[in-house]
Amino acid sequence: MTEKQRAAVVHNPVKVDREDLERIVGALEAELDWEPTLWLETSVEDAGQGPAREALDAGVDVVVAAGGDGTVRAVAEALRGTGTSLGLLPSGTGNLLARNLDLTLSDAERALRVAFTGDDRAIDVALARLRREDGETEEHAFVVMAGMGLDARMLSETDDDLKAKAGWLAYVHAISKVLRDPNELKFALRLDDGEARRVRAHTVIVGNCGSLPAGILLLPDAAVDDGVLDVVVLRPGSLLGWLQAISRVIWDNGVLRRLPWRKNAPERPSRALVYSTARTLDLRLTEPHEVELDGDAFGTAVALRVSVEPGALQVKVPFSD
């Protein structure tokens, strides 16, 4: 007799309605003849790593992350390298990994069916090692993007209550505050085994994938399974530089690159946005700056090392034809 499969759902009780999910999951259990699902909540103290490890200890076949980007990141951190699949039930304002995998964002029944019955796709996981000002270090995984500079400061300035009510509109006020901040990052940057170079910039972003909400393609060549990290350094320097950066992201990346006859066209050179790729990135700052991982603030650091673990995470996606 074939052993029945079992799922676990790690859910953020603030962002999802468990009662609605239990109805959908119960119907899938009956249809597929699966064991009763293990339900585990996240908390302020534990964004999902602990519940995901509890699910692994229970021997489940798939762990569904039901929540925002922070829940997905935390569950992925626990599942990486285990072979146990991650299912995605998007919720919240970003849903960045689901967007980059072209998964449904608004149909819970479809998303859960994919989580229970879909194909496994191996994707890369990025590891960020942060060194604090007091010399302490800590390591966290992420699956979408890490950043220092403007985007991290924007997150620290965003009102959580307004974000819950207005979604991405809550960032508008934060962006206006950050753009008035003249502070720049000053750091030494080394990619792989290359020479370290000194850089002044507003933002550094390291991506495992490149799409943001509203169709913004920040890292146009990034792919979740290419075994490399995509890096962009934003250093506009002037109002003209800001306009060039915005034009590059919104027009070149978001419009022109999506046209069939423009896909392989050479990129316009820009001093405002400098792109590169690497398997490891080392960044040493002259003073502590804020860090964000997959849209969550992680405090300040004086150094950051990012590396990639190719194919370390299995994610459930729709069956391919």
Image (cartoon, rainbow, N blue to C red):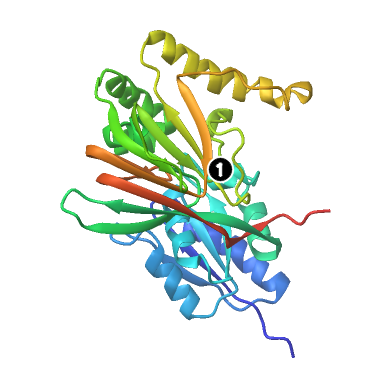
Q: Amino acid at mark 1?
A: Cys
* Residue at the left extreme, as displayed: 134
Check the image and report above or below for 169 versus 276.
above
Place residue 253 in its image quadrant.
top right
Question: Which residue is painted at 42% across and 15% down in the image?
Answer: 242
65 relative to 139 in the view: left or right: right
- In the image, residue 92 sits, relative to residue 39, either above or below, namely above
Residue at 70% x, 26% y is 258
Q: Is residue 148 visible?
A: yes
Q: Name above or below for residue 70 compared with residue 41.
A: above
In percent of width and height, residue 172 lies at 37, 23
Q: Position of residue 55 (x, y in %)?
A: 48, 74
The quadrant in which residue 100 appears is: top right
The image quarter containing residue 41 is bottom left
Instruction: Please state if 278 lies on the left or on the right of 167 as rendered.
Output: right
Q: Position of residue 283 (x, y in %)?
A: 34, 42
The answer to which of 22 and 246 lies nearer the viewer is: 246
| SS label for mark 1 | loop
Mark 1 sits on what residue?
A: 209
Of 272 and 7, nearer the camera is: 272
* Mark 1 nearby-residue class (10 Å; few <14, some 14–19, many ≥20): many
Location of the N terminus by quadrant is bottom right
- Return the residue nearer the eye: 72 or 123: 123
Residue 106 at least partly seen: no
Q: Position of residue 50 (x, y in %)?
A: 38, 69
